Image: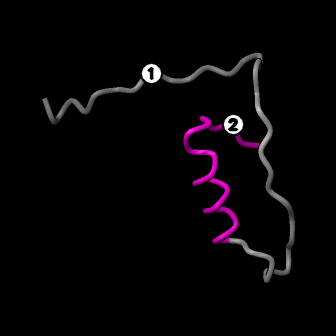
Amino acid sequence: MMVVEKDIRDDVLHAIYKQMGMSKKARGIAFALPVSDAAGLVKEPEHKDEESE
């Protein structure tokens, strides 16, 4: 299971399908469901690159 922001969801699913496809021996499915609440998940604050300052 992966939880990603909605704006990158389609890119993530496309990358998984492109890399794995259905021609591989180990097959599976990838799908998206909306997540309205989750316990214990926190988005890390973005850190500025100290070298670029």
- Element under disc 2: loop
- The answer to if 3 sits in the magenta stretch is yes
Residue plotted at (56% across, 23% down): 43
Q: Which residue is mark 2?
A: 3
The disc labelled 2 sits on which kind of residue?
A: Val
The disc labelled 1 sits on which kind of residue?
A: Pro
Q: Earlier in the sequence, mark 2 or mark 1?
A: 2
Give the vertical position of 21 relative to 34 (above or below). below
Number of labels in the image equals 2
**In the visual, does 10 lie left or right of 46?**
right
Q: Residue furthest left?
A: 53
- Quarter of the image with the C terminus in it: top left
Viewer-nearest residue: 26 or 12: 12
Residue count near mark 2 (Cα–Cα under 10 Å), binned few <14, some 14–19, many ≥20: few
Q: Which residue is mark 1?
A: 45
Residue 14, position as x, y percentages in the image = 64, 61
